[in-house]
Amino acid sequence: MNEASQAAAIQAIQALVRKKRMTSSLPLLAIALCTVVPPVHAQFTTPPPPALPSALVLSEELAYRFQRFLDAETHLAISEGRITVANLKSLRATFCALPDSPYPRGEACEELISADSIVASKSAAARKRHRALLPFGLPGSHQRPDVADYLRAATGTSGLALFNQFAASVSDKEAYVVTNAISGLAGRTIFAIDYAAVLVRDTAGSAASRREVEDAKSTIIRMINNGGTVAARLQWPIHAKGGTTFQSASSLSTRFGLIGPAGKSDSLRFSGAVVGEFMGALSIRDPGVSGNLLGELLLGLRVGMAYSEAPLTTMADDKSLGFIQLAVGLRQESKIGLSALVTWPLEERYKGLTPRLVLNLSAVR
């Protein structure tokens, strides 16, 4: 969480305190969490792999241009296996010597077009490059070294968090802060313990009804985003694939812990959640020959079911809650400056108890 986000969270929480519409202990707790233990985990914890290097984009473009350069008779000869590597290399040399080409010429061009692979595959069609860090597999089926390689490639030193600003969502009525106690690999399983502090203000009705609504909102927000007030997370990747244009990853996680006011141990009850996540990243590149990466358009989807040993709220007897979350963001230089998070509780009665839309427009302020 950067300094600007911390300051915004603290100011919003202090404003709620000044309005005297909340208890004093919870705002002080949230301020302490923002300043002493900066939140590092958000709702989305399935980072996509990085985009492949720009050099491979150039290789794809040259392969496509070379495919267009060859005439129909040559393509037929390639598909029937009647052309030799030597003949194809001669055609490649002619293509790479074309004048006024914006692409590399000569040997630099020839190195990016493999005559051997074209002859072996009997096709000159340009192929999209990709790297499967984790092929599709059942949760828990990937070996620890492969999972570790994926996490190192996808996150570097930034940890597992994605859409970090949602870990400290602040509005005029809700403040949601998630802090992480521990996060790492336990064998082939991603293990973490997260604590969710939620501040809610309601202005309608009597003091008793406002407290009831505030407690209900706090519970629902915690259950959707963290599986409880404090919860352990066991997460297993399903796949992770990187390309020059699109990257994606998915995972399944289970969470178990406690839900209720953190300061009232007799009010805590067991809780948990099962969540499936998908995260995609669409590369935005310079249209020039360099193909440099300018940014990524991120799309995240969470579908889950949260449950509690006791009714979630005093307003209903339900002990479980299904939900869907959709996040869209623009990432540049490993930072997300524009983003939106939409949350849909699947039960109609809970749709008024969680923020429907959370925006982050820091890049245009």
Image (tube, rainbow, N blue to C red):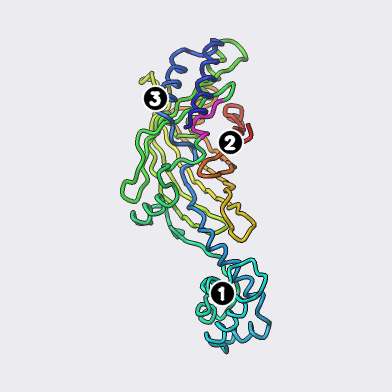
Q: Which residue is mark 1?
A: 106
Mark toward the start of the polypeptide (1 vs 3): 3
Q: Report the span colored magenta.
A: 165-170
Quarter of the image for residue 292 reads: bottom right
- Mark 1: which secondary structure? loop
Measured as percent of width and height from the top left, residue 219 is found at: 49, 26
The residue mark sitting in front, 2 or 1, is: 1
Q: Residue at x 45, y 60 (%)?
A: 135
Question: Nearest the camera: 343 or 361?
Answer: 361
- Give the amino acid at mark 2: Thr
Give the label on residue 36, or none. Answer: 3
Quarter of the image for residue 257 reads: top left
Position of 169 with respect to 67 (left or right) is left
Mark toward the start of the polypeptide (2 vs 1): 1
Measured as percent of width and height from the top left, residue 101 is found at: 65, 69
Q: Residue at x 52, y 39 (%)?
A: 163
**Residue furthest toward the bottom?**
82
Q: Which residue is mark 2?
A: 343
- Give the amino acid at mark 1: Gly
Position of residue 65 relative to residue 161, above or below, is below
Q: Assess whether mark 2 and mark 3 are in contact (beta carbons under 8 angstroms).
A: no
Mark toward the start of the polypeptide (3 vs 2): 3
- Mark 2: which secondary structure? strand
Question: Nearest the camera: 59 or 194?
Answer: 59
Q: CA distance from mark 1 to mark 3?
A: 58 Å
Question: Nearest the camera: 38 or 280?
Answer: 38
Position of residue 89 relative to residue 29, above or below, is below
Q: Assess whether mark 1 and mark 2 are in contact (beta carbons under 8 angstroms).
A: no
